[in-house]
Amino acid sequence: MSCKDWERRLLMNVPRDPNTGELCLSVVETHPLTIDVGWASYGDDSENPVQQLRSLAGRHRKDHDKEDLHVKGIFLPRPFWTDLESGFLRLGEFLAFLGEEEIPFERWGHLDIVLDDVEHPYDMSSPALLPLHAFSNLRKLTWTGHRKHLLVSWLPFTPTLLRTLTSLEIQCDISLQDCCHMLFYGENLKEFTVKIIQRDLATEPILGCFLPESTCTERPLEYLCLVSDDDIGALLRPFHFPHLSRIDFTIAHRTPSYYEWKIWKTLQSIELKGEFSFEEQSWIVSQCAVKPLFRHATSYAMCASSFKHNHNTRNPPFFEVDD
């Protein structure tokens, strides 16, 4: 494809500001490579994003030994944006175009998707725009958005995708069953972060409605970070984590099953936020080789409305805590 053909195809597909006609696309070449569709635009003093991508793609094709690419795709609509379905679809189309035409998917080692907390319409009959089989080197996936798009989107969380990952971070309201589904199929995961597990969604799983019956499914997990309004014991019981060394749990469930968790002996770093009695703390300390860090919740504020995906922070205010 010639340079002019490439630019023409790109310009035909990238959304524009209906008021100014500017491209609603920003390309930032720093680590990670950030593709922002729907919010950012460039002005007269900025390089045309088409030129940026052409230059970037050329460098990556020449330097095959360069470290794996970290790609970040963002769709956070501006107030004027009325066709949200089109904008959501456009980001998927653009990422697919980038991987198929310019920077091969096998170069992508970390994919970071940031969406708003809105369920955008998506045709279930449409094939996934990002070919999951092409992500042969994808090891880390960070995903923020609406839980329905874990399945109904241009990047569905299929077993094929989950099996390639060693690190997965999910930031959305989600059910315990869905977390278990991801851990079951994410058989190579070493790092797993979920914010937040909501017990009100127990009857509405998106990915799967089962919990494994086996209690000896081994996983190579080393780090587990959970923010939960449900009893995470149901997530821990079916699995065996012989290499788990770090946990960071924010627990809003009133009666967590601490005594049933078979994870304490291998831990080297323990941070627990929630409401703990003196007896519970003493028992946990007695089970661990290192001293846990407890942070006590002074007010119970865990609810779905408390986290509407503030993208300027990675630590949503579920609790007021004592430092």
Image (cartoon, helix red, strand yellow):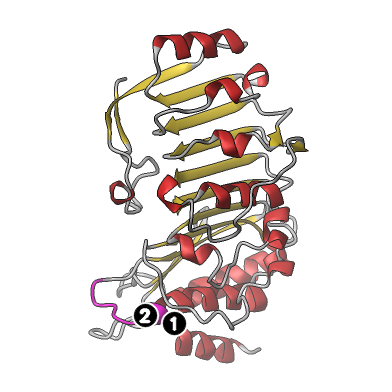
Q: Quadrant of the C terminus?
A: top left
- The residue located at (29%, 80%) in the rendering is 82
Marks 2/1: CA–CA distance = 7 Å
Sequence order check, earlier mark of 2 and 1: 1
Question: Where is mark 2, residue-wise?
Answer: 23
Q: Which residues are magenta?
A: 79-86
The front one of 21 and 112 is: 112
- Counting other residues with Cα less than 10 Å from the Cα at mark 2, is it few (<14), some (14-19), or many (20 or more)? many
Contact (CB < 8 A) between labels 2 and 1? yes
Q: Amino acid at mark 2?
A: Leu
Q: Is residue 164 left or right of residue 87?
A: right
Q: Secondary structure at mark 2?
A: loop
Can you say whether 204 is above or below 224 in the image? Answer: below
Specify the quadrant of the image occupied by residue 39.
bottom left
On the image, the x and y values in percent for residue 153 come to 53, 71
Q: Secondary structure beneath disc 1? A: loop
Residue 28 in view in this figure: no
Q: Which residue was labeled with disc 1?
A: 14
Residue 209 picture location, percent across and down = 59, 56
